[in-house]
Image: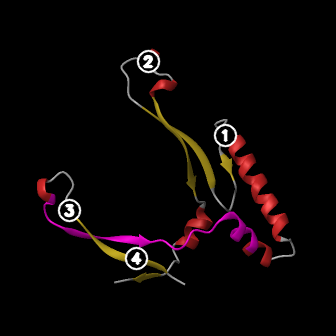
Amino acid sequence: MSVKYRAVPKGQPGVVGGGTTKYYASLIRGERVDTRQFAEDIAEMNLLSTTMVYAVLEAFFKRSNHYLSKGHILDLSQFGTFMPYLSSKGVDTPDEVNPNKFKKFYVNYRPNKLQRRLMRNVEFQKVY
């Protein structure tokens, strides 16, 4: 199975009227896979029941949130790393830096080398 994409026209940023139109690849995402479907798929691959897999995934979500919300880095070896980040507004003095200046607190996922290598083997299919 391949990842589908299409060509999308876009104007030049910052140019009045859009400037010269260029075409860029745009990913066509597949259907969303929810936790239940994910658990069922994993259960089919081994001897665990869907309920057991779902319980493990729920525990994973709760525990990962526990660590990430405390600023910890969650390293899941072959899967990759989840790291919390903070974005804030710039201010003139260190004393002005406080939670009121925070724009957002978010989590970034970084796949490990194996995951990145596997993603290089993805096949693409252009859709018109």
Quadrant of the frame with the N terminus: bottom right
Residue pointed to by mark 3 = 11
Is residue 29 part of the magenta span, yes or no?
yes
The residues bearing labels 2 and 1 have C-alpha atoms spaced at a distance of 25 Å
First reached walking from the N terminus: tag 3 or tag 2: 3
From the image, state whether disc 4 or disc 1 is nearer to you.
Answer: 4
Q: Are marks 3 and 2 in contact (CB under 8 Å)?
A: no
Per the rendering, the mark at residue 38 is: none
First reached walking from the N terminus: tag 4 or tag 2: 4
Residue type at mark 3: give it.
Answer: Gly
Considering only vertical position in the picture, is 112 above or below 67? below
Q: Are marks 2 and 1 in contact (CB under 8 Å)?
A: no
Residue 46 percent coordinates (x, y)? 83, 76
The residues bearing labels 4 and 1 have C-alpha atoms spaced at a distance of 36 Å
Q: Are marks 3 and 1 in contact (CB under 8 Å)?
A: no
Residue 128 percent coordinates (x, y)? 34, 84
Which of the 4 quarters of the picture holds residue 127? bottom left
From the image, state whether disc 2 or disc 1 is nearer to you.
Answer: 2
- State which region is magenta: 18-40
Per the rendering, the mark at residue 5 is: 4
The residues bearing labels 4 and 2 have C-alpha atoms spaced at a distance of 46 Å
The residues bearing labels 3 and 4 have C-alpha atoms spaced at a distance of 19 Å
Residue type at mark 4: give it.
Answer: Tyr
Residue pointed to by mark 2 = 96
Residue 13 vs residue 82: left or right?
left
The residues bearing labels 3 and 2 have C-alpha atoms spaced at a distance of 39 Å
Residue pointed to by mark 1 = 72
